[in-house]
Image (tube, rainbow, N blue to C red):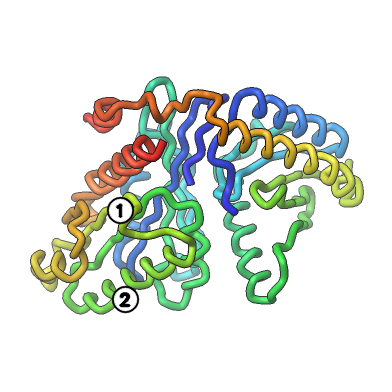
Amino acid sequence: MSGPDVMFPEEQQQMSLVCQRLARDANAKAVLLIGRDGQPIAEAGDVDELDVTSLSSLTAGNVAATGGISKILREKDFTSQFHEGEKTHVHITLVGGRAILVVLFDERSSLGLVRLRVKKSSDEMVRLFDQVAKKAAAKSQPSILTEITDSDIDNLFND
Amino acid sequence: MSFINYSSREINCKLVYYGPGLCGKTTNLQYIYQKTSPDAKGKMISLATETERTLFFDFLPLSLGEIRGFKTRFHLYTVPGQVFYDASRKLILKGVDGVVFVADSQIERMEANIESLENLRLNLTEQGYDLDKLPYVIQYNKRDLPNAAPMDQLKGVLNPTKVPEFEACATSGVGVFDTLKAVAKAVLTELKRGS
């Protein structure tokens, strides 16, 4: 399964709230929610100094590579990864098979606490992703794509 | 797979540059990076070996402007061209919205081009895609070299379905943006068509 293909403002706001709560409850430096294709979805905490786009792409690549390893070993997806740094540690979890939750933390927190809080947040995120998928399938909101005209696309590429 | 965020008003798409080893995929991205204004691009990432051969992928996030108040963001990836890295290539194709096949025009690389194109088709099929249904363009790179094969020969062998094709010299930038624009436009047109 790849990442979600759409996100609506209501669920985006709720995802951001879940990320903020997780950052606070886990004493984390930052929390990022990323699609499996590497698209940033939501973030919380101290992200001003972070290159979120690069981090998202590299994390998705990392998860994809780990998924490749699991396939060779005939394992199911490895659902979480932990990178221990000197100052910053990174905890990476798959959320419902379609997104990646990244928690950056330091000595003010612990792996045990992060794992505990991540579990609760993941469940909430899975529920929100299901909600988005249902909404998208029901086509209850008009798609921007239907409004785009050929000349809109042409205009984008006019020098 | 494209990602449309109605909250941040963004349309995100993934483009993959594919082709045999040393055909100039990374050079394409480097040229785009050099010639794009800082506000339209993010950091370019290259996961390369010590000898600067692509090990996993290169990545360049690019903004191409707005459509109806939505920012269009393209994530450009290259794959490692060396035959050995096939597992990595498959991973990078996941979620692809458009493909550029960069062919090496040198006559000696014809076999490598054919092998890489067959590999692209096969790997896409494994991921559930059909190259003939994806936005897809071909770039004939290194046209400036004296040992470049005639265009008719390259077209006949590599482009039987007659997708948009461009002659290029990625080191000097000839054809680089024409290729990018063509594939990006095809991706947006396909998104609109599929909606």
Label 1 – label 2 distance at C-alpha: 17 Å
Q: Quadrant of the N terminus of chain A?
A: bottom right
SS state under label 1: strand
Q: The numbered mark 1 sits on a residue in which chain?
A: B
- The residue shown at (78%, 54%) is A86
Circle 1 residue: B136
Q: In x, y percent, where is residue A85?
A: 76, 55
Q: Position of residue B182 (x, y in %)?
A: 25, 44
**Mark 1 or mark 2, earlier in chain:** 2
Q: Amino acid at mark 2?
A: Glu
- Is residue B34 at least partly visible in the picture? no
Residue name at image x 71 percent, y 49 percent: A96
Quarter of the image where one finds residue B34: top left
Q: Quadrant of residue B132?
A: bottom left
User: Please, is residue A30 above or below residue B18 in the view?
Assistant: above
Q: Residues within 10 Å of mark 1 (few under 14, many from 20)?
A: many
Against B91, is A56 above or below? above
